[in-house]
Amino acid sequence: DIVLTQSPGTLSLSPGEGATLSCRSSRSISNTYLAWYQQIPGQAPRLLIYGASNRATGIPDRFSGSGSGTDFTLTIARLEPEDFGMYFCQHCGGSLWTFGQGTKVEVK
Amino acid sequence: DVQLVESGGALVQPGGSLRIPCEASGFRFSDYSMNWVRQAPGKGLEWLSYTDNAERYIFYADSVKGRFTISRDNAKNSLYLQMNSLRADDTAVYYCARVRNYYASGSSVYYFYMDVWGKGTTVTVSS
């Protein structure tokens, strides 16, 4: 089974700074099955990126995704106050869907 | 508006059962595969179960296989999760999510992801 490992566990940053979040897969996966979700405390998850690099509808262009094979990255260009929360990568493997354990982006 | 609404969350005793529905609106429910995902208090997201639009393909996480059953009623625009033999570690917020799977003809690839989520319903298993 695919295991997704996200790093770092916590990012402490100030509004306006950039953030780089990593998601590493235990083996090579197809880009098209890798997605990123944002979860603000008390809210449901929200799709940010699908196919590793495609922004979902309505997602600001300060969010971008990249990567291939086993290493994927979510970049937030300039953090806005509403961006602080949890971020999860996720893989669809046919009969098994897997989430990373999450990265918390907190206010420094 | 495209919307998913879970309901039916409750306090249940260990060993008990519960069925939670997810009602869809604003889109043609019968065209879409669906997932159940949960989140234990203070923890990350855990995928539980998938059904395609006609229940031809159904999958479960090992943690719930044999105890939970996913089903749907396309005429009622509803998805269900039947949970039996509940344990304390099943305590969580349960979300339903719409699966988007489409073929991008320009690049000849399939995409799979969850593009719409409900707000969740809380299930607490405790005596």
Image (spheres, coloured by chain):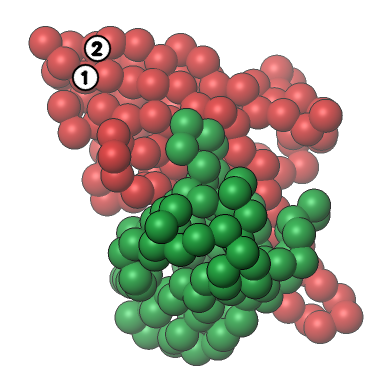
Chain colours: A green, B red
- Badge 1 density bin: few <14, some 14–19, many ≥20, Cα 10 Å: many
Quick one: quadrant of the N terminus of chain B?
top right
Residue type at the position of mark 2: Val
Q: Which residue is mark 2?
A: B12
Q: Position of residue A12 (x, y in %)?
A: 39, 62
Q: Position of residue A84 (x, y in %)?
A: 51, 51
Q: Residue at x 56, y 85 (%)?
A: A67
Tell me, yes or no, whether the two marked residues, 1 and 2, touch with CB atoms within 8 Å: yes
Q: Residue at x 43, y 31 (%)?
A: B94
Q: Quadrant of residue A54?
A: bottom right
Q: Position of residue A19 (x, y in %)?
A: 52, 71
Q: Which residue is mark 1?
A: B125
Q: Residue at x 57, y 69 (%)?
A: A17
Q: Position of residue A60 (x, y in %)?
A: 76, 59
Residue A103 shown left or right of residue B13 in the figure: right
Residue A52 in sight here: no
Farthest right residue in view:
B106
Q: Residue at x 46, y 63 (%)?
A: A13
Residue B45 in sight here: yes
Callouts 1 and 2 on one subunit:
yes
* Distance from the alpha carbon under mark 1 to that under mark 2: 5 Å
Name above or below for residue A102 compared with residue B47. Answer: below
Of all chains, the one bearing label 2 is B
Q: Secondary structure at mark 1?
A: strand
Residue type at the position of mark 1: Val
Of all chains, the one bearing label 1 is B
Quick one: quadrant of the C terminus of chain B?
top left
Name above or below for residue A98 compared with residue B122. Answer: below
Q: Nearer the viewer, residue B50 or A28?
A: A28
* Res. A5 mark: none
Q: Secondary structure at mark 2?
A: strand
Name above or below for residue A15 compared with residue A4. Answer: above
